[in-house]
Every structure is written in C-alpha cells, then in structure tokens.
Amino acid sequence: MKIGLLEPLRVPDTLIEELAAPLKEAGHEFIYYNEKTTDVNELAKRSKDLDIVMIANNPYPKEAFEKATQLKLINVAFTGVDHVDVKAAAEREILITNAAGYSNTAVSELVIGLVIDLYRQISAGDEEIRADNFPGPFQGKEIKGKTVGIIGTGNIGLQTARLFKAFGVELIAYSRSEKEEAKALGITYMSLDDVMAKSDIISVHLPQNEETKGMISREKIALMKDTALLINCARGPIVDNQALADALNEGQIAGAGIDVFDMEPPLPADYPLLHAKNAQLTPHVAYLTDEAMVIRAQIVFANTMAFIEGHPQNIVG
C-alpha cells in the first residue's frame, strides 16, 4: 500500500522514521511531508495516489481527497474528527480512525492548572508584581472541599475526575450514559441542570456534534453559583461564549478557564472572551505536550499497521 503522512506530528523526524520502519519492511511505500499546508489543492496533490492518509488537526475537506481514488483510510492523529468531511468519506466507504486517548493526561492537567491559576490568581499576581503595582496579597481559594461537576465522563473526563479527587473534592457529573468506573471513583450522576447549579467548579469534556453544540447555553450558565468556575478544554462551540463573557462581566459567575473557542486562534480583536473579567485563556494547547505528541504518533502508526493487517482499531467513521 501507499501511505502518506501529510503533515508534521510535532515529534522528531527520527521517531517518524522509527515508527515507519515496520511499514517499509513489510513492503509498503511511506511518504512523509514535514511541512504543513492548508491549501486544498496541495492536500489533493499529496493525497492523490494514496491508499492511506495520515493527518493531525489539519482541515481535510472532501476536495482534498475526492480525486484520491485508491483511498481506503483517513487516519487522524487527533481525538476529534470534525475537521474531516466525514460524510464524504462515508459515501465512499473510506474508513476513519482517530488517536483517542493520547492526550488524556495533558488535557486533565491543564484543567487543574487553569483552576489553580484562577483560585490563586497566579497570572494576575505575576502581572501586578512585574508592573510594580503590587496592591497587597491576593487572597485565593482552595480546591479541597469544593464540588466539582464533570460534564462528560469519557476517558478525559474520568482522568480529570481522578486528579480532582486527589484534592479532596466532591465529584458529581452529567453524561448521556453512566459508567461504573465513574461511580467507583465516587462520582454521583445528576441532571445537567443540577450539575450546573450545584458545582463550584465545572469542567466540560464532551465531543462536538449537533447534540452538544451550544449545550452550555445562556440558560445553563445562569444556573451556576456566583462563586463558580467554568473550565472548557473540550470544544469551543459547546459553550455559548458570548453568554459566558456576559456572565463574567456581570459577576454572575466568578471565573472561567478556556482553551477552546468558536474558531482556532488567533482570535478577532472583538471576540467577547478577550474582554471578559476573570477569564484565563490559553490558545488551544490542552492536548499539546511533548509526551502526548509521542503517544499520538505511536497510536496513529499502530492504527495504520492494524488496518493493513485486517483488524482496524480506533474506528470513528
């Protein structure tokens, strides 16, 4: 088979060569493009003769693969696949796989980091002391004893719950399906409204789809305590970010830690969260650690080999 990795995976080329070696030894052709492109015509050119395409979070519309007549697998080195034209792939019976699980630790650790930053005002304190404008000690809050609401108890949601549990919190959650593993952690499942109303800290861990888009709406945000934090390291459109900015500016909630938005950064100057009070923003980096990049490279190459050997894994479409 002819296999192409169409963009870099943020790991050393030596690791790519190491992971590709078994494919080459088995007689398959492997092509690696170490320069990323978002040009659809260039993507189409790179994809044209391939049996297997490997990408990360680069947009991959149907125009990029409609002339790739041999294409059998779109192997995504990412958890979400909303940047791929899944419908067009399904119409041609092209399989889609992902690298779910590679960033569980990375994302959950950033959630904790955002909460600590907001509770202890680390970034605000750093700015004040560098500006020689120290107003006196910042009095913060502790995580211990708080009620933490996990919205979505998939792998990342559960890993986040495990980290919070170490701080001595009460765990509650909303999810479409209840997991025994979650209950074993001490999580109590509730309705979404109850989780929004009872939590001191809310962490969103849902996939983006038609059902979840806008799920954390103005009405849901209005249910939150005025002392509560909202953390979103999942997908931006799940939260009504205009409503969130309004709630922050009006003091309806205490703070927010946001890594994902309605579009990829850079954000337009008038984006509402850029001007919201007590909003700690990061540029969609929750997944991005040295360790996570190595894990996802290993997963995506394992997905390729599994497909070739006739037992595909991590299938999402």
Image (cartoon, grey):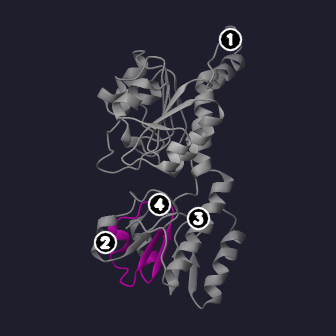
Start-end of magenta stretch: 46-75
**Figure check: 31 above or below 219:** below
Q: How far apart are the alpha carbons under marks 2 and 4? A: 19 Å
Residue at image position (69%, 23%) is: 126
**Residue 132 picture quarter:** top right
Name the N-terminal-most of marks 3 and 4: 3
Q: How far apart are the alpha carbons under marks 3 and 4? A: 10 Å
Name the N-terminal-most of marks 3 and 2: 3
Q: Of tags 2 and 4, which is closer to the observer?
A: 2
Residue at image position (32%, 77%) is: 93
Residue at image position (29%, 69%) is: 88
Q: Which residue is mark 2?
A: 90
The outermost residue toward the top is 136
**Figure check: 46 above or below 106:** below
Query: In the shown orientation, is residue 247 left or right of residue 285?
Result: left
Other residues around mark 4 within 10 Å, as few (<14) / some (14–19) / many (≥20): some
Front residue of 210 and 61:
210
As helix, strand or loop, the secondary structure at mark 1 comes to loop
Other residues around mark 2 within 10 Å, as few (<14) / some (14–19) / many (≥20): few
In the image, which disc is placed on residue 133? Answer: 1
Q: How far apart are the alpha carbons under marks 3 and 2? A: 26 Å
Q: How far apart are the alpha carbons under marks 3 and 1? A: 43 Å
Residue type highlighted by circle 3 = Pro
